[in-house]
Amino acid sequence: MFERFTKDARDVVKSAFAYVEGGGGGSVEAEHLLLALLDREGSRGSFALAALGLGPEEREPVREALREARRGAGLSRAERDALAGLGIDVAEIVARVEEVHGVGAMSGDRRDTRWWSGRPSFGRAAKDVLEGSLRAALAQRDRHIGDEHLLLSLTARPGVPAEVLADHGVTYASLVRVLYGGGGEAKAG
């Protein structure tokens, strides 16, 4: 599949691995792909983010929201709400665990989960995003998978990245509108 990736999309994947190797966990997850996309400049994905109000200067709140979600075991708002409905206060659990084990103890940043090679691998969520990027490219009749397709895929699947992006006005529908307009032809980039 990576042979269909543009240079920008490959750079996103490489940057996501760099986040993991720099202490961001044991495997590449969807959040790492989003962080790598937020670092991009001059690509179709970064253009789309900027067009929707998330230019390079406005991306720090998204990074902070991802850090906070990761600190709370990576639970989405829907998952936290469901647990609250059962009488489980996630914030209280996080506070107690961090009191004993230190800040970030529930973030899942364990290095012992790597594959036998000692190198990080793709987690389930990241694999789903990569597969979704292929579906996004095919849906738009694009011949290659660019960073914009990774971004589309992140917004199309439930989870923390889509939730955080939606909180900042970036949804699948708004991305399609910015990238492809109404007629299906590429508008951005």
Image (cartoon, rainbow, N blue to C red):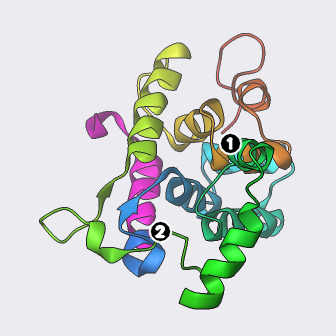
Task: Name the residue: 70% across, 35% down.
Answer: 188
Quarter location, residue 169: top right
Select label 1 or label 2 by which is in front. 2
- Dot 2 crowding, Cα within 10 Å, few <14, some 14–19, many 20+: some
- Between 159 and 155, the residue placed more toward the observer is 159
Identify the residue at horizontal 77%, vertical 63% (top origin).
59
Element at label 2: loop
Q: Position of residue 29 (x, y in %)?
A: 46, 54
State the image coordinates of residue 26 (x, y, percent, origin top left).
35, 68
In the image, residue 20 lies in the stretch drawn in magenta: no
Q: Main secondary structure of the magenta part?
A: helix
Disc marking residue 108: 2
Q: Nearer the viewer, residue 149 or 88?
A: 88
Residue carrying label 1: 162
Write the start and end of the magenta stretch as one range.
1-19
Q: Position of residue 187 (x, y in %)?
A: 71, 27
